[in-house]
Image: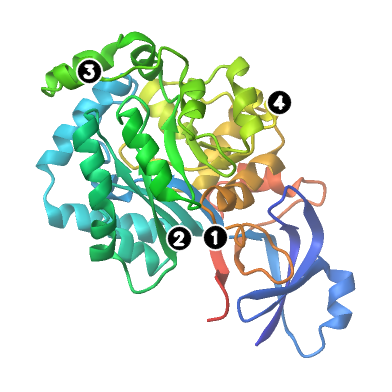
């Protein structure tokens, strides 16, 4: 069936908007988009739907940890990364399997209600993979932690068998290997993961907090004590720290490459960002998570000035109030008024689509099937539609066209 969706404004996902716009869709596929005055006369036979408010592509949550969904409220806010991690590991060890699964199901439902169609899931257990594939498109990154080289290489060798044992029938969420972070994964293990990934999307937590920088410099900071508390003192002492900043170390390991999703960058310094921009990698920001753990935000203005592409994620419910990437866009907008709202909405749509390796999502353009999200409300005639989307609270949202081809 052909439908014509006529709205007060359409955000195309690339930072541009069409006021009094229309989208012609056939099944789930966009056939045309533009001013309603141009499309309405050409849409004979289409079912016309007049919608108050704004239409935009389905949202992309470019960084999630759904298997941590049951950790909501079980970690201390504002205490820093190591106390947060300590509490997280303790709570996770005590969680029952049925509690974990129920929390994952609730998190998936909440993302759907928010209008998310694509995800970048990071997983240790693959437990959410099949459920994600039934609801979303995206990439599941199978994450490896390993201070010890030999154990880490064994873990890398075991990944394909673990993948094959858990692979869902639907290929909507693709599998890819990934290191956790430079301070938690031996450099040789990272190299092996990059080789195993091949051309698949790549991700890593990078320059997330000051503890990372201190450990990579000289094994200093609170991570050394954390590893000692876990019986990993010998592995930490043997760990070959690079003695350079995290971004330079990531570049040396082959992690800075086109399309690589570099998550957080909250501790990145302006002078380090040129290397990220030159590489073609994408910064995946999770600002509400950073505020919860370390009471700081990523350097959005510096990232934008350096020309680094931006995507948005939420991280897990262990550190974020919700899994809604538009809420993270709002958090950045409210604290960085010099950054256009259109830039941040694009980060939650087309930017995220690039980061998770699904560029066919995130933009309303002829031939694509990105999903169409309706945010309902009274859009003032003189209002910027992107600004309105980020400022309006409590507005009803509904995915009125599913993503991903015909259904």
Q: Is residue 221 left or right of residue 330?
A: left
Residue 320 visible in the picture:
no
Identify residue for label 4: 305
- Check whether the beta carbons of the residues at disc 2 and disc 1 lie within 8 A of each other: yes
**Closer to the N terminus: mark 3 or mark 4?**
3
Q: Which mark is residue 397?
A: 1
> Is any atom of residue 48 visible in this view?
yes
- Of 68 and 36, the residue lying toward us: 68
Mark 2 or mark 1: name the one nearer the start of the chain. 2
In terms of sequence position, does the residue under pointer 2 or pointer 4 come before the other?
2
- Residue that mark 3 sits on: 238
Q: Earlier in the sequence, mark 2 or mark 3?
A: 2
How crowded pointer 2 is (Cα within 10 Å; few <14, some 14-19, many 20+) is rated as some
The quadrant of the picture occupied by the N terminus is bottom right
Of the numbered discs 3 and 1, the one sitting upstream in the chain is 3
Task: Name the one closer to the observer, 203 or 395.
Answer: 203
| Distance in Å between CA atoms under marks 2 and 3 | 47 Å
x and y percentages locating residue 214 in the rendered image? 37, 12
In space, the residues marked 1 and 4 are separated at their CA atoms by: 32 Å
Q: Are marks 2 and 4 in contact (CB under 8 Å)?
A: no
Does label 1 or label 4 sit earlier along the sequence?
A: 4
Residue with the mark numbered 2: 113
């Amino acid at each position: 069936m052909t439908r014509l969706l006529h709205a007060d404004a359409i955000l195309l996902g690339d930072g541009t908007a069409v006021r009094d716009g229309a989208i012609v869709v056939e099944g789930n596929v966009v056939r045309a988009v533009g001013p309603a005055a141009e499309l309405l006369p050409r849409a004979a036979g289409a079912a016309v739907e007049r919608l108050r408010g704004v239409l935009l592509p389905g949202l992309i949550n470019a960084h999630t940890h759904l298997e941590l969904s049951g950790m909501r409220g079980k970690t201390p806010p504002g205490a820093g990364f190591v106390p947060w991690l300590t509490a997280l590991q303790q709570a996770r060890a005590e969680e029952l399997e049925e509690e974990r699964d129920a929390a994952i199901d609730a998190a998936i439902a909440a993302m759907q209600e928010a209008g998310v169609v694509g995800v970048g899931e990071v997983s240790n257990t693959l437990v959410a993979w099949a459920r994600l594939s039934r609801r979303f498109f995206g990439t599941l990154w199978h994450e490896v932690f390993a201070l010890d080289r030999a154990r880490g290489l064994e873990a890398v060798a075991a990944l394909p068998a673990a993948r094959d044992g858990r692979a869902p029938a639907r290929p909507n969420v693709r599998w890819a290997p990934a290191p956790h972070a430079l301070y938690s994964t031996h450099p040789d293990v990272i190299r092996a993961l990059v080789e195993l990934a091949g051309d698949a999307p790549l991700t890593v937590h990078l320059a997330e907090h000051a503890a990372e920088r201190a450990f990579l410099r000289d094994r200093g900071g609170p991570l050394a004590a954390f590893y000692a508390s876990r019986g990993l003192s010998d592995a930490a002492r043997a760990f070959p720290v690079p003695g350079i900043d995290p971004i330079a170390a990531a570049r040396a390991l082959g992690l800075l490459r086109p399309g690589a999703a570099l998550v957080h960058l909250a501790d990145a310094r302006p002078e380090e960002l040129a290397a990220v921009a030159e590489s073609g990698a994408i910064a995946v920001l999770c600002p509400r998570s950073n505020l919860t753990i370390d009471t700081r935000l990523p350097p959005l203005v510096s990232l934008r000035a350096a020309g680094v592409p931006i995507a948005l994620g939420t991280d897990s419910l262990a550190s974020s109030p919700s899994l809604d990437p538009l809420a993270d866009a709002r958090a950045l907008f409210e604290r960085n008024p010099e950054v256009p709202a259109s830039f941040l909405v694009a980060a939650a749509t087309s930017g995220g689509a690039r980061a998770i390796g699904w560029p066919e999502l995130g933009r309303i353009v002829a031939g694509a099937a990105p999903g169409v999200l309706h945010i309902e409300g009274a859009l003032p005639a003189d209002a910027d539609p992107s600004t309105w989307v980020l400022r309006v609270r409590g507005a009803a949202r509904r995915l009125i066209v599913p993503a991903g081809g015909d259904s």
